[in-house]
Amino acid sequence: MARKRLVVLVVSVLLPIYSQAFDSKATGFRAAVVKVDITPEGHQMLLGYGARKSTGVNDRIYHRIVVMDDGKTQFVLVSSDICVMSPAEYDRVAARLKKQLGIDPVNFWWNLTHTHSAPELGPPGLPALFMANRYEHHFDSDYAEVTEKKLIDGIAEARQKLVLARLGVGWGLSQANINRRAKDIDGKAYLGMDPDGAVDRRIGVLRLDKEDGSPLALLANYAIHGTVLSGENLLISGDAPGVVAEYVEQKLGVPMLFINGAAGNIAPIYSGYPNPKAGRMNQFRVLLGEKILAANKSISATTNDISLKTASLIVETPRKPELGWIDELKDYTRTTKAGVNMVKLPVRFLQINDDIAIWSAPLELFCEISNEIRDRSPFPYTFYFGYGNGWLGYLLTEEEIKHGGYEVTVSPFTPVAAQHLTDSVVNHLQGKK
């Protein structure tokens, strides 16, 4: 049987797809999208900077949910306008989905846009270990419950709306981001801008169309911190990712899932401003939104012959000596017989036919790592979906750890972690055991 390959047309691709429907009476690849408002009614503690409470709303925030079904695998992808969450929060919701809807956690990815102007969601998890002064208050359990319920209900709604669909893929390019690890004359790193530093300006785009060719949903993968707005801002906002998603949706008339990438050392080119006007936030509609629309136009062909394949692995790597841990994350660590404390880092994979590979991890990953993995991948379309299923801190390259800086202080990993992760992911993508 011939392997399913994508036929590349300029910067786009034609996807071979095989499927039978979730409903045994229907046939063909199916998909659906649902957008759910999760903007809180009252004031909330915001996450991303020091502890602070919102005073109002600049722009509304959402769950955006896509379900894809090839008849054998039903895959759920969620993009939420939230900064970070504990892996334990993901585990609780995944368990509820398994019980209520029968969805295996390996087929449920919950990625966050990483806006720093959204409410906290659930208990803090690992950030409380690094920045305890930010978490002297209790999280809002009512908001967490409402937001979790909206997510589960939204997924259930999307499963009921599945329609015959087609899928296409392409690349784009935007210069809306910049390396944020500025170096002083002594080599010490600090939060700023480094025009010569590593960066990832590729946009990965997946488009879902209905069978008649009309648009259904767009997925845009791009690395950028949600930090146009600084800690002085007290208005709830999706930041640049939210503004861009809303703009593209207005142009296309369908929801767009913004999926952040390896943004651990990447900032927006306007970053750290007290309000949207000062930060030129609306300009990201041009800087990034228009580039996403251009990438979408480059997809000149789609197809309805899709095969979805999910997988997972645990990458074990030593954690910093003498570093404590959070009780609720006991499943994410172990101690070896030699007494070495390890981090158990979960990595997820989605393969679409033989040309698209997407991997995800609960990390603020430095872009050099995902860039290398993409370069070594046998799949012409290899995407990293960041901030996936929780947050286990920054994962830096060994070289960048030498320069110190903020990111080193909020990382549980040792210098060998980047190589452990890279080798494990590349080996999986290359089909090596």
Image: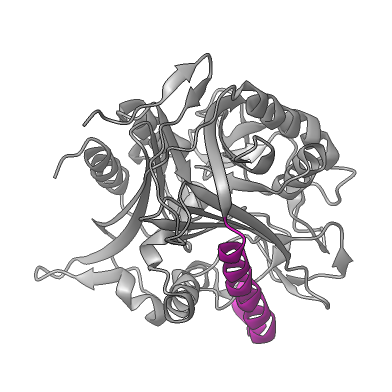
How many numbered circles does the render carry?
A: 0
Q: Is residue 191 left or right of residue 15?
A: right
Query: Which quadrant of the figure contains the C terminus?
Result: top left
Q: Position of residue 364 (x, y in %)?
A: 49, 51
Query: Which quadrant of the figure contains the N terminus?
Result: top left
Q: Is residue 61 left or right of residue 307?
A: right
Look at 48% across and 55% down and name the residue there.
26
Relative depth, front residue between 415 and 427: 427
Vertical side of 324 occupied by 264: above or below:
above
Which residues make up the magenta segment? 134-162
List the single residue furthest toward the left: 337
Q: Position of residue 20 (x, y in %)?
A: 40, 51
Vertical side of 175 occupied by 67: above or below:
below
Report the predominant secondary structure element of the magenta stretch: helix
Look at 42% across and 76% down and name the residue there.
98
Dividing the picture into quarters, in which one does residue 182 lie? top right
